[in-house]
Amino acid sequence: MRVADWFGAGLTGLGAEAFGPLMASGFATVDGRVIEAAQEHISADILAAEKHFRALTAGRSEVDWIAREDYPDRMLSLFARGADLVVASRPERGDGASYAARPAELIMECGGPVLLVADGDAPFRGDRVVIGWKDTRESRRAVSDALPMLMRAQHVVVATVDGENEPVASLNEVARRLARHGVDASVEVVAKGRHSVAETLEETATRHSADLIVIGAYGHSRLREWMLGGVTEDFLAASSSFLMMSR
């Protein structure tokens, strides 16, 4: 809601839960009462989610609610067609795709920026931002998508991690581009050391008291990152910062 207030935006809440597969043997089908109970449970969950959303947004204008019996990430990606930004959190431990949106699926499918909520309860400020830069299409898209956030920020750092073979000239070009939009951005090449790129960017954000990191997602193929590891997968697993990710 804070982000909506910054930009005078409307809010749309989405309640979605899928009817997961029910096991049946080769000799019997699932009892109809079991199916009915599962559907009643989904309806109750979605009604509870709507009640919570309405309480949080009471008194606000331009508020809408969408409810569907389907996979949450599929529905968020579908209805992202009417939104400038999708806000999501990581699933709680043990939550399956029937109950919670998978951030990786959102990033791949929604066609716009995703703001992923930080681990913990700290409120989002967004006044100090670190851009994790690598000269890829995904990073360029992320900077473009994040421009409204960057233009309201008080302090922006365009950072690349030493070892990523990123020329400083490309960082300076990004900083000059941002300056044309009124964003006073500094550039920084950060030593990686023994940490991963994601950990190094998190440490950079902490050092600059930034609670938002902007990155392009899946600069390598998603399969390669899933198999071998990568910055996007590391950030999706956990982050103490809010993440704005685009692909």
Image (spheres, rainbow, N blue to C red):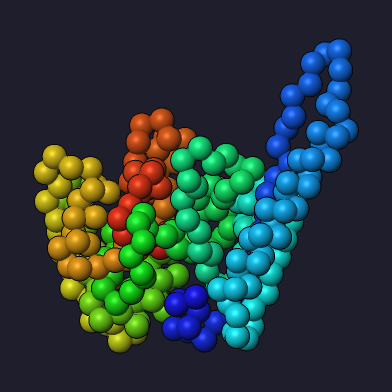
Q: Is residue 212 left or right of residue 25?
A: left
Residue 140 spot, x, y in % from top left: 38, 64
Q: Is residue 85 left or right of residue 231?
A: right
Q: What residue do we see at 52% from left, 69% from top?
A: 85
Q: Nearer the viewer, residue 138 or 116?
A: 116
Q: Nearer the viewer, residue 175 or 104?
A: 104
Q: What residue do we see at 65% from left, 67% from top?
A: 51
Q: Nearer the viewer, residue 44 or 179?
A: 44
Q: Residue furthest top?
A: 27
Residue 136 spot, x, y in % from top left: 36, 55
Q: Quadrant of residue 220?
A: top left
Is residue 77 depicted above or below 208 in this figure?
A: above
Q: What residue do we see at 31% from left, 59% from top?
A: 241
Residue 37 spot, x, y in % from top left: 79, 40
Is residue 98 depicted above or below 53 in this figure?
A: above
Q: What residue do we see at 33% from left, 73% from top?
A: 126
Is residue 29 depicted above or below 138 in this figure?
A: above
Q: Quadrant of residue 47?
A: bottom right
One can see residue 139 in this view:
no
Q: Is residue 52 left or right of residue 159?
A: right
